[in-house]
Image (tube, grey):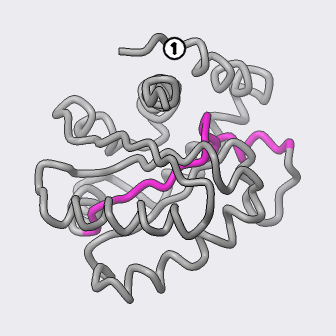
Amino acid sequence: MNHDHYIAPVRHWLETLVIGLNLCPFAKRELVKNRVRFFVSEATTDEQLRMDLEAELALMADNEAIETTLLIHPHVLQDFFDYNQFINHTPSMLKQLGYRGSFQVASFHPDYQFGGTEPDDVENTTNRSPYPLLHLIREDSLARAVENYPDPDQIPARNIALVEELGAEKMQALLRACFDAPAR
């Protein structure tokens, strides 16, 4: 499998949407410091993905140089409902593996939909990505970043206001452009 085929669009998404639109004010620092790991899972089943997730968590636990991992899984959990079911089980998995309080798993998906929204509502684009992703985050680092950020509770509302201002057409164009990104 050509992993660059999957990494290039995700990196472009991170640089252009997440950092470029400042959807996550904490992401730029880690990308600039080369502390973001891009891992492409070859999993085709939920169980294989669980094994990859477990391996990536263990790698992060043993390697402080990796601040965050974007676990890209293009061949499993394409359906958002199935993806959401998987995500709902990650807190218990973290607890079972002894990583509760150490890591969080954030969710991004091409068809992401917040509860109480319609599929085409523009606010969903704040969590849409080129491929389904599991974002592994160090909890202590996130806590420090949030502590040093003015009014972190306003980040989601600011993001929604921004994407509403840009509009659905512009956000869809930005997401589509991720697939034109050259491999590095």
Q: Nearer the viewer, residue 39 or 1?
A: 1
Position of the C terminus, as image quadrant, is top left
123 is higher (above) or lower (below) than 34: below
Q: Nearer the viewer, residue 116 or 7?
A: 7
**Residue found at x 50% / y 29%:** 21
In the rendered image, residue 136 lying in the magenta stretch gets the answer: yes
Q: Position of residue 153 (x, y in %)?
A: 46, 61
Q: Position of residue 42 (x, y in %)?
A: 51, 47
Name the residue beneath numbered marker 1: 181
Q: What is the count of numbered marks? A: 1
In the rendered image, residue 7 lying in the magenta stretch gets the answer: no
**Residue found at x 11% / y 56%:** 64
Give the quadrant of residue 32: top left
Give the quadrant of residue 25: top left
**Residue found at x 71% / y 50%:** 78
**Residue found at x 26% / y 74%:** 102
Horizontal side of 66 relative to 116 (left or right) equals: left
Q: Position of residue 80 (x, y in %)?
A: 74, 56
91 is higher (above) or lower (below) than 37: below
Q: Which residues lie in the magenta part?
A: 120-139
Give the quadrant of residue 34: top left
Number of residues whose C-alpha sits closer than 10 Å to that of mark 1, classed few (under 14), some (14–19) or many (20 or more): some
Mark 1: which amino acid?
Answer: Ala
Instruction: Find numbered disc 1 in the image and state the secondary structure of the residue it sits on.
Output: loop
Horizontal side of 124 relative to 120 (left or right) equals: left
Q: Is residue 157 visible?
A: yes
Q: Is residue 16 visible?
A: no
Q: Position of residue 127 (x, y in %)?
A: 61, 47
Q: Nearer the viewer, residue 30 or 48?
A: 48
Horizontal side of 81 relative to 38 (left or right) equals: right
